Image (tube, rainbow, N blue to C red):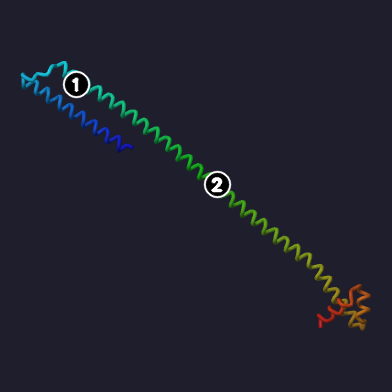
Amino acid sequence: MSTILEALLLLVGLGLLCVLVFVGYLLYQNQSNSQNKIDQEELAEVVETLEKMVSETDEFIKNTKNEINEAKEELYKLKEDIIKLKESEKAKDTKKEESQKAQKQSEKAKKEEKKDEQKDADLPEQKITTDKVIMVRNLYNMGLSVADIAKRLELGKGEVELILNLKK
């Protein structure tokens, strides 16, 4: 946009220079050649017209500069808004990632807790099973039959036989 403004200023300047050269030429001709005298009033009108053109051009340039500055300010504000939005989204993404990590850690901790609870729950059962096996073996070694062991321990005959067969 500023290159257009510079080109416009250059053209206006060149135009004014041409007009001034022409006026100077006319003045020179007026002094050197008395036959082609240009009336002083016409010359004053030309100068007045040139001054009016210069004034209008200056006003146009000022308005254009103001518009450019306003556009730059608006672009700057938009750029700041975009940066703020990006930072806000980045913060949201970071919070989301942290939340997901915390959730994963929580789930992992719950799984480990369940495993520990399962292990703890399995231990008494294993102990009971081990106690059963010991009692069955002791009673069998004492010479009791499978039916007698099953009655005493309130177990099924098949369970007693299974325990005895597994431990052989």
Q: Amino acid at mark 1?
A: Val
Locate residue 72 relative to residue 149 in the image: left or right. Answer: left
Q: Tell me the SS state at disc 1.
A: helix
Is tag 2's residue or tag 1's residue first in the polypeptide sequence?
A: 1
Q: Quadrant of residue 148?
A: bottom right
Callout in the foreground (2, 1) = 1
Quarter of the image with the N terminus in it: top left
Q: Tell me the SS state at disc 2.
A: helix
Q: What label does residue 91 carry, if any?
A: 2
Label 1 crowding class (10 Å Cα cut-off): few <14, some 14-19, many 20+?
Answer: some
Q: Quadrant of residue 132?
A: bottom right
Q: Residue at x 82, y 74 (%)?
A: 130
Q: Residue at x 27, y 36 (%)?
A: 7
The residue that label 1 is drawn on is 46
Q: Residue at x 15, y 26 (%)?
A: 22
Label 2 crowding class (10 Å Cα cut-off): few <14, some 14-19, many 20+?
Answer: few
Compare residues 136 and 10 and report the one nearer the observer.
10
